[in-house]
Image: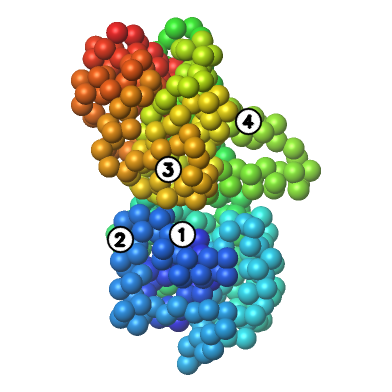
Amino acid sequence: MRILIHGSEMAAATAAAALSWVGHRVAWMPHAAADWSTLSASGWLASEPQLLAHLEEGLEEGSLRLLTPSSEGIFEDPVECLWLSLSPEQRVDAAAFAEQAAGWLAEEAVLVNNSTFPVGETELLEARLGAGCRAVALADMLEEGRAWETFTRPSRWLLGCDDDGAEHRVRELLRAFNRRREVFQRMPRRAAELTKLAINGMLATRISYMNEIAGLADSLGVDVEHVRQGMGADSRIGYEYLYPGCGFGGPNFSRDLMRLADVQSASGRHSALLDQVLDINEHKKETLFRKLWAHFHGRLDGRTVAIWGAAFKPGTARIDHAPVLTLLRSLWAQGVRVRLHDPAAIPAVLAEVGEHPLLEVFEGDPLEPCEGADALMLVTEWKTYWNPDWSRLADRLGERLLLDGRNIYDPRHVAACGLHYRGIGRRADP
C-alpha cells in the first residue's frame, strides 16, 4: 500500500520503519517541530532497539522516503493510507494536515489516527476528507524501550472503527503483524479513544494506591513487600503495576492522565480520583529527598549524593516528567552536590538543566560517582545497577546510606553488607 505518515512521535518513527520493512511504500513527513535531522540526532531514537537501523535500512532501499512540507509529489498514484502520529498539542496541525492531504488520497483511502487526541477527534478528522474516505482510531500501545517489538509482535491492536470497509483496509495494512494469532479488538471510534485513556488511568491508579500503602507500611514498621505479595496472590488483583516507587514519568503515561482529566472536565464531570492520582505521583517524586532529610535530620547543606538513573524508565534516554528532575531541584535547593549516573539519559539531563554548579555527570562505571558521596539514591532500575559490588560500594559511601527508589534490593542483604537501607515501604540497618 502507498502510505503517508505525518508526525515526529515515537509512534510515527516506528510505523515508518515497520511498514516500510514489510513491503509497503511509505512516505514520512515529520512534524515541523522535530524534523529528520533533529530526530536522527536524538538520544531517544538512537536508544530504541532496532528502530534507527530499520529506518536507515528503509531509506537506503527506497521503501521509505522522507518528506518536508515543501516536498512535491508524494507518489505517482494516490495515497491509500494517511497515518497521523502527533502529540496532543499538535491537534490543530493534524486537522490542517488532513485537510491538505485530502487532495492526495485515493477515493476509498483510510486515515489512521494513531494520536492521543480528545474523544471524538477521529470523527472530526474524517469530516475533512473526501466523501469515500474513512477515519479510524488506532490506539498508540507502544512501550518506550521496546517500541519495535511491540509494533511488530503486538499483543493486540485496539481499533476504533465504524465502517467494515475501513476495518478491512486496516487489517490489510497490518496483516504482516497479525499472523501468529488474532490481535485486533474492534470497537466504535469514541469507545477506543476513551479506552486508551482509561487504561493508563487505571494503571496509574494502581501505582498510586500501592505508593499510598507503602507510605502506611513505613509508618507502621511493616515491610511493604509482604503486603504486595499478599495482594498480588489474590486472583482479583494480580501482580501487575503493584510495585511502589518514587514516582512515574514519561511522555505518554503522564500526558494521557492529564488528557483523561481534560476529557472529564470537558464533559462536566470533575474527577477527584484522577486529581488524587496525579497529586500522589508528584508527591512521590520527592520521597527519596524526604528520606534523605529524615536520615540526616535536615542537615544537608554541603553533602554529596550519588544518583543512579535519570531516565523515566530503563531502556530509554527520555526524561519527560521523570522523578529525577523533581529530585534534583529539591537537592540543589538544600545545597546538596549531585553526582549523577545514567547509561543513556545524561545528554537529555544536560539539555534540560544545563551545566549546574552542583551537578557532575557520569556514564561509565556506576561506582565512580559514589566515590566520596554520603549516600546513593537508586531512581531508575537499569539492569546495570541490580548487582553492584557491595563491599566496594560500602567503602565509597561516607555515610553508608542507600535509598532505593524502586525496591529492587533485598534489605537484609544490603544491611548485612554494612549499609543503611531505605526503600519505599522497606528499611533495614546494619
Q: How many marks?
A: 4
- Examine the image and state in which quarter residue 396 appears: top left
Q: Amino acid at mark 2?
A: Gln
Label 2: few (<14), some or many (≥20) within 10 Å? some
**Depicted 96 relative to depicted 422: above or below:** below
Relative to 10, residue 93 above or below: below
Q: Which class describes the residues within 10 Å of circle 4: few (<14), some (14-19), or many (20+)?
A: few
Give SS at disc 2: loop
The vertical placement of 337 against 191, above or below, is: above
Picture quadrant of residue 187: bottom right
Name the residue beneath numbered marker 1.
10
Of tags 2 and 3, the one toward the viewer is: 3
Q: Identify residue for label 4.
A: 279
Q: Are marks 2 and 3 in contact (CB under 8 Å)?
A: no
State the residue position of label 3.
311
Contact, CB < 8 Å: mark 3 with mark 4?
no
- Label 1 and label 3: CA atoms lie apart by 16 Å
First in sequence: mark 1 vs mark 4: 1
Q: Residues within 10 Å of mark 1 (few under 14, many from 20)?
A: many
The residues bearing labels 1 and 4 have C-alpha atoms spaced at a distance of 27 Å
Helix, strand, or loop for circle 1? helix
